[in-house]
Amino acid sequence: MNRLEKLRALIASQKVDGFLITNPYNVRYMTGFTGSTGIALVTKSEALFITDFRYIEQAEREVTDFHAVQHKATLVEEIASYVRNLNIQTLGFEKEHITYAQFLLYEKFITKNLVGLADVIEKIRLIKTPEEIRIIKVACDIVDAAFEHILPQIRPGVTELEIANELEFFMRKSGATSSSFDTIVASGVRSALPHGVATDKIIEKGDFVTLDYGALYNGYVSDTTRTVAVGQPSQQLKEIYEIVLEAQLVGVKTFKPGMTGVEADAVVRDVIRSHGYGEAFGHSTGHGIGLEVHEGPGLSHRSNHRLEAGMTVTCEPGIYLPGIGGVRIEDDLLITADGNDVLTHAPKELIIL
């Protein structure tokens, strides 16, 4: 089945006559539209993409499997008109992707039964197609090349922002549209901040420097982390590096179809816990990547979703010691029929610059 057929099957199972797609990532996934304004309406027999004057020409070029139409009235009034004309009695909508104010507008103009649904298209997005995997691999190749490029430039006297800017510039020169998220460059004691976005802090001798960055390529993302040392680090920093590396390698070796997010998280977390640093690893072991840098499935103690072949996920354990420093190592993985393929290949042994 293609994506539209899969969506219609899910809609039918939810007992709604139509489904309104408003999340921009889901709109792109279903229609192929890469612009910033538009929604989609799907019924058993119709598939409409509705946009305004600015984007109708682009939509007519890009949209597949959907009929692109331009709205003349307000968008919600246009939706209401199609709901009436298509005799939709029960309309499903993405309840996690609209505001309360938008919902009140729907109630005002769409005088039918509104049913909030969650993770309808996200379920389809979990398993990547061969073309999606090809694009994600290119995004991963870009970040690998960026790591090799940036290493000679990480030295005492350079700021975190200078490193982050050079990483982003290189990725764009290598074909990326942009970075996947705000690039993290966290040095010294700031490396204990899991999301320490780059600042004007100067990198110093003895610092650990954590680089967490990704490339957005053709709509899809990569997400990788490496931690390097500038000069000889302390013995404690070396120790936690080796522990994180051990845990990360266990995850890479172990992740396979059939494992739940809880199980995947546990095999990695147990390594860190066994060395006495369990409290210093406070985030999940990983997450899905695709159109978004954080999407399903989750690899955490809360996620019972099972890994399946075709999913793309991260494995990113870390240890963070406030006032001292931290380490995170992250790869992107493709779950295969009997295990996984690692998509990011930058070296992981401790590099001392």
Image: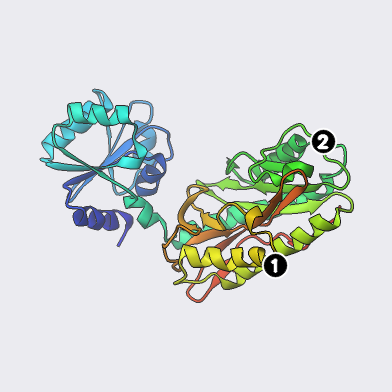
**Tag 1: amino acid:** Glu
Circle 2 crowding by C-alpha within 10 Å: few under 14, some 14–19, many from 20: some
Residue 338: horizontal and vertical position, in percent?
A: 50, 76
Residue position marked by numbered label 1 in the rendering: 246
Q: Which mark is residue 202?
A: 2
Secondary structure category for the residue under label 2: loop
Quadrant location of the N terminus?
Answer: bottom left
Question: Which one is in front, 68 or 158?
Answer: 158
In space, the residues marked 1 and 2 are separated at their CA atoms by 30 Å
Which residue is nearer to you in this view: 249 or 278?
A: 278
Q: Residues within 10 Å of mark 1 (few under 14, many from 20)?
A: some
Q: Residue at x 72, y 45 (%)?
A: 322
Q: Nearer the viewer, residue 61 or 26?
A: 26
Image: 304 above or below 339: above
Residue 232 image position (x, y, % from top left): 89, 53
Q: Nearer the viewer, residue 117 or 300?
A: 300
Side of 216 where 158 appears, left or right? right
What label does residue 183 carry, if any?
none
**On screen, residue 151 above or below 252:** above
Q: Residue furthest top?
A: 73
Kind of residue at disc 2:
Ile
Marks 1,2: beta carbons within 8 A: no
Q: Quadrant of residue 60?
A: top left
Q: Secondary structure at mark 1?
A: helix
| Apparent side of residue 279 relative to residue 157 in the rendered image (left or right) | left
